[in-house]
Amino acid sequence: MSHSDFPDRLPARSSRKGFLDALKYDANGLVAIVSQDAKSKDVLMLAYADRNAVEKSLKTGLMHYYSRSRKKMWLKGESSGHVQKLVGMYVDCDGDAILAKVRQVKAACHMGYRSCFSFRIGKDGKMRVVGKKLFDPKEVYKK
């Protein structure tokens, strides 16, 4: 069976465990998650999660991810208070990427912007800030 048969890998009777078992994690045990504002439809960020983080997100209703740099699970907003409340979780047809529709508290980006995708590259190659900055990271993170 190829990984493109994702729906066929799901158990006949749906369960959280069946869903978690059927996901196609990469060699590091991670799956990509795109978070999207459930109301505005803005793409907020891309992060990764291991099985435990996906399961914790589903159980608590708050988005958890896996930090590749810190090598541990983290609750989105654990330092800033800018949590993501899970509205719905969707998986792509291959089972190797998740779309999390969320209600974002304040901002998703650690740089203070509503979205991590607040920088546009023009046809001229120049980068422009197109997003709205909502907070000063130095004040929030005390760094």
Image: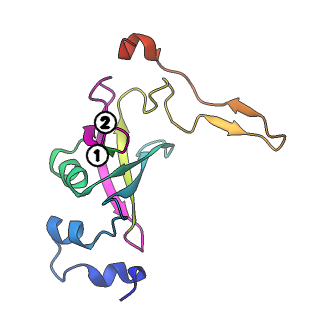
> Is residue 131 toward the left or the right of residue 35 in the image?
right
> Is residue 115 toward the left or the right of residue 84 in the image?
right
The answer to which quarter of the image holds residue 143 is top left
- State which quarter of the image contains the N terminus: bottom left
The residue at the point 35 percent across, 78 percent down is 6
> What residue would you read off at disc 2?
76
Compare marks 1 and 2 and give the one earlier in the sequence: 2
Horizontal and vertical percent for residue 73? 25, 43
- Packing grade of label 2 (10 A; few <14, some 14-19, many >=20) is many
In this view of the protein, which residue sits in the foreground, 75 or 134? 75
The residue at the point 27 percent across, 81 percent down is 9
> What residue would you read off at disc 1?
86
Relative to residue 30, is residue 77 depicted above or below? above
Horizontal and vertical percent for residue 57? 23, 48
Mark 1 and 2 residues: CB-CB less than 8 Å, in contact?
Answer: no
> Is residue 108 toward the left or the right of residue 10 in the image?
right
Q: Which residues are magenta?
A: 68-95
Horizontal and vertical percent for residue 83? 30, 32
